Image (tube, rainbow, N blue to C red):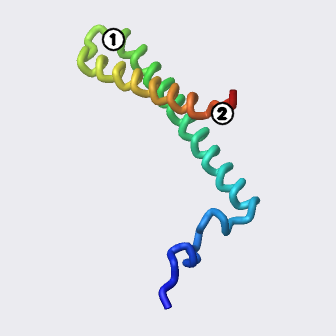
Amino acid sequence: MASKDSDIDTPGDASDLPPEAAIDNVDRDLFRKYERLRQLRIEHRDLDDVITRLSLDLHVDEIQLKRLKKRKLMLKDQIERYESQMIPDLNA
């Protein structure tokens, strides 16, 4: 007798999880996002410090400085994207 796909019990199906596990999963995901955002902010701040110090050097490699500034801008964009994702959607 052939069974339908809907009759197959798949492990890890979201409907099999108790509500506490689903909430725990959401909490983990949120924690990961906050942690990634924190790491990006730290890297951005560190790059800012390095760029400031290198700018004071008369013999600085301008190409290296431009690359660092570009990396800093990319980090800023990533930070803004993460912050935007963290804002909950409001139903109008």
Q: Which residue is mark 1?
A: 57
Pick the quarter of the image with the C terminus: top right
Hey, which quadrant is residue 89 in on the image? top right
Asked if residue 80 lies left or right of residue 21, the reply is left
In the picture, the disc for residue 88 is 2
Q: Nearer the viewer, residue 70 or 60?
A: 70
Q: CA distance from mark 2 to mark 1?
A: 44 Å
Asked if residue 63 lies left or right of residue 28, the reply is left
The residue depicted at 46 percent of the width and 23 percent of the height is: 76
In this rendering, the answer to whether 44 lies above or below 34 is above
The residue depicted at 60 percent of the width and 67 percent of the height is: 13
The residue mark sitting in front, 2 or 1, is 2
Q: Nearer the viewer, residue 63 or 73?
A: 73
Pointer 2 or 1: first along the chain = 1
In this rendering, the answer to whether 48 lies above or below 41 is above
Q: Residue furthest bottom?
A: 1
- Neighbor class of circle 1 (other Cα within 10 Å; few <14, some 14-19, many 20+) is few
Could you tell me which secondary element the residue under label 2 belongs to? Answer: loop
Hey, which quadrant is residue 74 in on the image? top left
